[in-house]
Amino acid sequence: IKVVVDIHRDSIAMTGNDKCKPTAEINGKKAAQVMLVVGSQTGTVSGFPDWKQNLRLALRFQQTMEATHPGLARAMLFCSRKYNMNLTKGSMLLEVGTDANTLEEAVYSAELAGDALLSVLNTLK
């Protein structure tokens, strides 16, 4: 196993009951923006020796998404947490849009992100 991707839909609440719906127009079609979440062994987090390898892979994925589909990726969330990414090298957590995005927007984004991930995988040894 070279890569493990844990896929979710984010939930971004604004004020009151308003929800945030991050989108980008790609090839004339609305796509839900995606966000990579990358944990690290910092602060009180321990037992995560491969976090730097995960970060390098996530950065390559983020850069490839931006190069192939500008605007698809939101800023990466880098934090002192594990989110089970400590269990396997090459682990990433991917938030595909939010609960406010349509299913069509999320599916389109997953296809675009999948294309970018395939490009990254083809470069791994």
Image: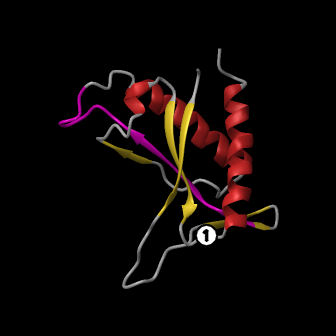
Q: How is the image coloured?
A: secondary structure
Q: Left or right of 28: which side holds 31?
A: left
Q: Answer whether residue 41 is magenta in the image.
A: yes
Check the picture and name the quadrant holding the N terminus.
top right
Q: In which quadrant of the rendered view does residue 15 lie?
A: bottom left
Across and down, in percent, residue 60 comes to 58, 34
Query: Which residue is rendered at x = 33% and y = 21% of the image?
Result: 49
Q: Answer whether residue 7 is magenta in the image.
A: no
Q: Nearer the viewer, residue 56 or 89?
A: 89
Query: Which residue is rendered at x = 75% and y = 41% of the image?
Result: 115
Check the picture and name the quadrant holding the C terminus.
top right
Q: Left or right of 98: which side holds 122?
A: right
Q: Nearer the viewer, residue 35 or 16?
A: 16
Q: Left or right of 6: which side holds 122?
A: right
Q: Secondary structure at mark 1?
A: loop
Across and down, in percent, residue 11 comes to 46, 65
Query: Which residue is rendered at x = 39% and y = 35% of the image?
Result: 84
Across and down, in percent, residue 35 comes to 52, 52
Boundaries of the magenta span:
30-46
Across and down, in percent, residue 57 comes to 54, 30
Residue 44, above or below 110: above
**Residue under label 1:** 101
Residue type indicated by callout 1: Asn
Residue 102, above or below 109: below
